[in-house]
Image (spheres, rainbow, N blue to C red):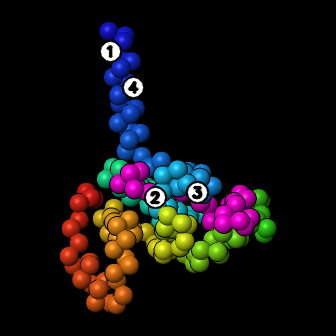
Amino acid sequence: MKKLLILTIALCSISVSAQKINWMSLEEAVAAQKVTPKKIFIDAYTVWCGPCKMLDKNTFSNKDVATYVNENYYAVKFNAEGNETISFKDQTFTNPNFDATKSGRNSSHQLAGYFGVRAYPTIIFLDEDNNLIAPLPGYKTPQQFELYLKLFETDDYKNITAQGDWEAYQSNFKYEFEE
């Protein structure tokens, strides 16, 4: 009976963990790309941002989103007003004006500036060579996020060169993620 209980708990924890995004640092994602190339998406958030918290609660915790992301991307959590030192593309990025005494808004991290982050949250998409595909600002529902996850993962964005192409892509897109 004890073995059955342990097995049940283990299986439950596996299924729960399978529905969470496997977050990593940017350095870990870049290293993983060298072994198995995938695109990267970076969640540029701040600790005070309400829509950032909603993105975590409603979108990133969605099982369809988590499964798709884990299979097709390396996911990075990045505090865009944090104090960490990040090495990326032979450069070192910091937040020299970070004030540890502040509990709310803080200065922007240099990496946020590098990627052109102007609002929180912003999801940054990078290709397999760590080149910027696009920053995606604002809160997205699981289905809204699905559109962009698949657009960038499949490279369909390369075929969108005019407004009409984007409108056609959106109208023909088949949503599969549950809200």
Q: Amino acid at mark 4?
A: Ala
Q: Can you identify the residue that label 3 sits on?
A: 30
Q: Is residue 139 left or right of residue 132?
A: left
Q: Position of residue 65 (x, y in %)?
A: 35, 55
Closest to the camera, between mark 2 and mark 1, is: 2
Dot placed on the residue nearer the N-terminal end, 2 or 1: 1
Q: Is residue 101 left or right of residue 9?
A: right
Q: Nearer the viewer, mark 3 or mark 4?
A: 3
Span of residues in magenta? 68-92
Give the camera-side residue of 153 and 77: 153
Which of the image's four quarters has the N terminus? top left
Residue 4 tag number: 1
Tell me the residue at 24%/83% (across/down).
Answer: 168
| Nearer to me, 127 or 20 | 127
Q: Find the residue positioned furthest to the front.
A: 35
Q: Please give the name of the residue rendered at 51% of the width and 68% of the height, measured from the top-left corner.
A: 126
> Gap in Å between the C-alphas at discs 1 and 3?
40 Å
Residue 80 in magenta stretch: yes
* Residue picked out by circle 4: 10
Q: Identify the secondary structure beneath mark 2.
A: loop
Task: Give SS at disc 4.
Answer: helix
Name the residue beneath numbered marker 2. Answer: 38
First reached walking from the N terminus: tag 3 or tag 4: 4
**Horizontal and vertical percent for residue 35?**
52, 50
Tell me which amino acid carries mark 2. Answer: Lys
Q: Amino acid at mark 3?
A: Val
Residue 138 drawn at (x, y percent): 46, 72
Cα distance between the residues tagged 2 and 1 = 38 Å
Residue 66 visible within the image: no
Q: Earlier in the sequence, mark 1 or mark 4?
A: 1
**Which is more N-terminal, label 3 or label 2?**
3
